[in-house]
Image (cartoon, rainbow, N blue to C red):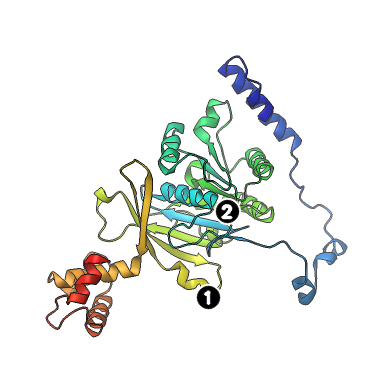
Amino acid sequence: REAAMTAAPASVAEMRAAVKAAVQEERKTYAPPAAPTNVSAANLAPAILDASVFCALDLPEKRTIIHPWVSEQGIVLLTGWRGTGKTWFVLLLLDAITRGQAFGPWKCETSVLCLYLDGEMAAQDVVERLRGIGGDPAGRLNPLYVYSDAYANTLGLPKASLRDKEWRDAMKAQLLKLGVKLWVIDNIASLTSGLDENSKQEWDVVNQWLLELRFAGISTILLHHVGKGGDQRGTSGREDNIDISISLQKPQNYRAEEGARFIVRFGKHRIRHRDLPLIQDAEFQIAADQAGRVTYTWGNAQRNTKTEILRMLDDGVTQSEIAATLGISKAHVSQTRSSAMRDGLLGQNGKLTQAGFAMVFTE
C-alpha cells in the first residue's frame, strides 16, 4: 500500500484503484490462524501445567498504559448517551497516551502506538476534532493513526464492519503490521449494521475476534450507546470478557450550555485492590480555550457534590430539595451537613463559616 501511495499516480481515480488493489493483495497474503481440527488429549497435554510451573513461565511483561485502567491486552467498554462527550474523551485520551502525558487523574505509565477508528462521522469532522486536540505530531512519543470509514469509502473500500470476517482479518493484519498496541472503535452501533443488539450469539463472533486481538497483544476500547435504563444497549454478553466498564454520565445539575461535562463512573473492573481509590468518580469538563485548542479540566466528583451541597445549604435550600436536584439521597445530604458542622465548615445557623466559604468558592 505504501508503494501505491508514493508512486504519485496521475489522477485521484488511479490512486484509489492502486490503494484498493494493494488492500486486496494484503487480504490475499494474510492468513489468520486456522481453528484447530485435530484436538486430542496429546495436543492439550503440553498446555496443562502444575501451578508452580505455570507461574515460573517466562512470559512477556503485561505493561500498564494508563494507570490503573488501560493496560496491554485489555478490553474496555465505554458507554454514554449520545452527545455526552465519548468521542472527545477518547481522542484526548489517545493524544495523552501517544505523548506520554497524564490524562485527568491517571498517570501514563507507557506511551504506545494508537489508532482511532471512526465509523460514523464525515472525514471533515474527524479532521476538525483532531485539529482541536492538536493534530501536530511534534511532541508525540508514538504515532496516532486514524482510520476514517468515510475517507476509506472515497478510496473505494467497502464499509467497515465488525460483522464481516474479511474486514476483521484485514484490520487485524494492519494493526499487527503497524505495531498498534491500543485502538478505539467508535462506535459499536455504526460498525455492526444489521446485527441484532440483543443477541449474544450474533455478538459472539465479534467478541471472539476481540479475544484474538487480546492474545496478539492489542488492547481495544469500544464505544457504545446506552439504552433507556442507562445501561449499555443490547446483550449483557457484551460485557462478559471486558476488563473495564466505564459510563459517562451527565451531572444532575448539568446545563446544556456547558457542552461536554460529564462524570466518569467505573462499573466492572479488573484491577488490583490497592488501586481502587484511583477509579473513584471523576468529573470532566471539555471546552475550547481562547486559541481554539480543545482542552479539559477535571475534579473529584464526590468532592464536587459535597461543595454543591454546602453551597445550596448556605443559600437556604432544604435538604429534600438538594437531594432531588443532585439526584442523591436525603441521608447523604444530612451526613454531609453534619460532617461539615463538625469540621467547622458550616455553622449552627446553617450558613458557611469563613473556612467553609473558602472551600466552596475558592478551591
Indicate the secondary structure of the residue bearing disc 2: loop
Left or right: residue 67 versus residue 263 is right
Mark earlier in primary sequence (1, 2): 2
The amino acid type, in three-letter code, at marker 1 is Arg
Instruction: Give the vertical position of 299 relative to 191 (above or below).
Output: below
Query: At which x and y percent is residue 29?
Result: 76, 35
Q: Please tell me which residue is depicted at 43% across the width and 32% down the height of the picture.
A: 124
> Residue shown at 53%/48% (left/top)?
184
| Spot occupied by residue 314 in the image (x, y as percentages of width and height) | 15, 72
In the picture of the structure, the residue carrying the numbered disc 1 is 274
Between residues 291 and 183, which one lies in front from this camera angle?
291
Residue 186 lies, with reference to residue 284, above or below; the image says: above
Q: Amino acid at mark 2?
A: Ser
The residue pinned by badge 2 equals 111
Tell me the quadrant of the picture where the C terminus can be found: bottom left
Q: Residue at x 53, y 52 (%)?
A: 97
Q: Position of residue 289 (x, y in %)?
A: 32, 45
Badge 2: residue crowd in 10 Å (few <14, some 14–19, many ≥20) = many
Q: Is residue 321 left or right of residue 252?
A: left
Percent position of residue 23, x then y: 66, 31
**Dots 1, 2 in contact, CB < 8 A:** no
Q: Residues within 10 Å of mark 1 (few under 14, many from 20)?
A: few
Residue 1 visible (yes or no): no
